[in-house]
Image (spheres, helix red, strand yellow):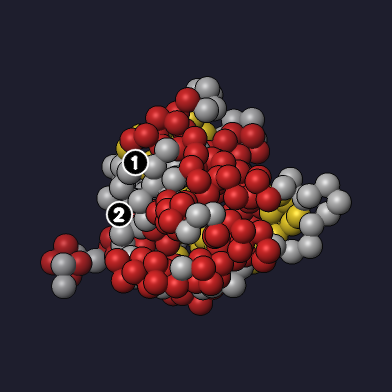
């Protein structure tokens, strides 16, 4: 997915990442004094939650988008955090450099998710945790699915054209996540559903971030609304759940989380003669 404008992204999806991060950290179980890597750190929501969770935890954030790294670097103003540009599929760190490797809501966007998980495991010490979570895009994110339903109602040809240009991704579920973690030789694998209530103060609070152009999806929504003379926004407003007297409303959200531990090396491997190890 193509991301732009980190400030706009904070309003569109980053605010929900920030709300979800503490629950994800409780699931992952990162301890005070540990050094964690935040893979695909984006605007830094998870890194900030890590810093707030304990007094001496340290975090290194890595993301391939320089503008997002710059945004994340400015936000915490905290010496326990550092950020740098880098790809999840080729992390620029030594084996076992971190106590934990975490990834919040970006696993589905990695070019090669399997390679990224292998890299997360590689840079984590034996016994350390490797954990990730991602939105349940199939059934657990009405914030976006309502928009797509409204777009199909007012501009089905534009939706079809978009999907021809940008084929829908196969979003992993819990079973897929377990498979990824098993393939990385991680042990004690657990999955969990993390539930979140998205509370919107008004329709404007919900809709305006779509117009910021932070992601390909939001740029599409803004373009459809402009091309249909505001019909998308009107259709979407009619599909929202019942509003409270003050105009507020709540949408449920769910993310899938997975974690596993890096296994200690097999001592017998190092006891074998060198020529046997190469077989």
Q: Give SS at disc 2.
A: loop
> Quick one: which residue is furthest to the bottom in this view?
175
Q: Label 1 to label 2, Cα distance in Å?
A: 14 Å
Whichever of labels 1 and 2 marks the residue nearer the N terminus, that label is: 1
Q: Give the residue displayed 54% in from the left and 54% down from the top.
A: 230
**To which quarter of the image does residue 244 belong?**
bottom right
Q: Give the residue displayed 68% in from the left and 50% down from the top.
A: 203
Mark carried by residue 91: none
Can residue 210 be seen here?
yes
> Quick one: which residue is furthest to the right in this view?
245
Q: Which residue is mark 2?
A: 89
- Residue 146 in percent (x, y) is at 59, 65
- Residue 235 in percent (x, y) is at 61, 63
In the rendered view, does 173 fall on the left or right side of 1? Answer: right
Q: Which residue is mark 1?
A: 65
Q: Give the residue displayed 49% in from the left and 35% down from the top.
A: 7
Q: Give SS at disc 1.
A: loop
Q: How many marks?
A: 2
């Amino acid at each position: 997915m193509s991301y732009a404008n980190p400030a706009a992204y904070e309003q569109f999806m980053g605010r929900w990442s920030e709300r979800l991060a503490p629950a994800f950290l409780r699931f992952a179980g990162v301890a005070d004094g540990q050094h964690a890597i935040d893979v695909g750190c984006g605007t830094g929501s998870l890194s900030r939650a890590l810093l707030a969770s304990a007094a001496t935890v340290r975090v290194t954030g890595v993301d391939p988008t320089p503008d997002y790294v710059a945004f994340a670097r400015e936000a915490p103003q905290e010496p326990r955090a550092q950020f740098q540009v880098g790809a999840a599929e080729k992390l620029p760190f030594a084996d076992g450099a971190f106590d934990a490797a975490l990834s919040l809501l970006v696993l589905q966007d990695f070019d090669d998710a399997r390679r990224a998980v292998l890299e997360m495991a590689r840079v984590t010490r034996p016994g350390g945790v490797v954990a990730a979570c991602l939105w349940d895009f199939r059934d657990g994110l009405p914030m976006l699915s309502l928009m797509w339903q409204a777009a199909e109602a007012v501009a089905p040809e534009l939706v079809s054209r978009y999907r021809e240009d940008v084929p829908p991704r196969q979003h992993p579920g819990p079973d897929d996540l377990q498979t990824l973690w098993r393939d990385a030789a991680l042990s004690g694998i657990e999955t969990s559903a993390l539930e979140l209530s998205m509370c919107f103060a008004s329709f404007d609070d919900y809709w305006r971030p779509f117009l910021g152009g932070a992601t390909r999806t939001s740029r599409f929504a803004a373009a459809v609304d402009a091309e249909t003379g505001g019909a998308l926004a009107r259709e979407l407003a009619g599909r929202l759940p019942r509003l409270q007297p003050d105009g507020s409303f709540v949408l449920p959200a769910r993310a899938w989380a997975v974690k596993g531990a890096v296994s200690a090396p097999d001592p017998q491997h190092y006891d074998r003669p060198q020529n046997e190890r190469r077989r």
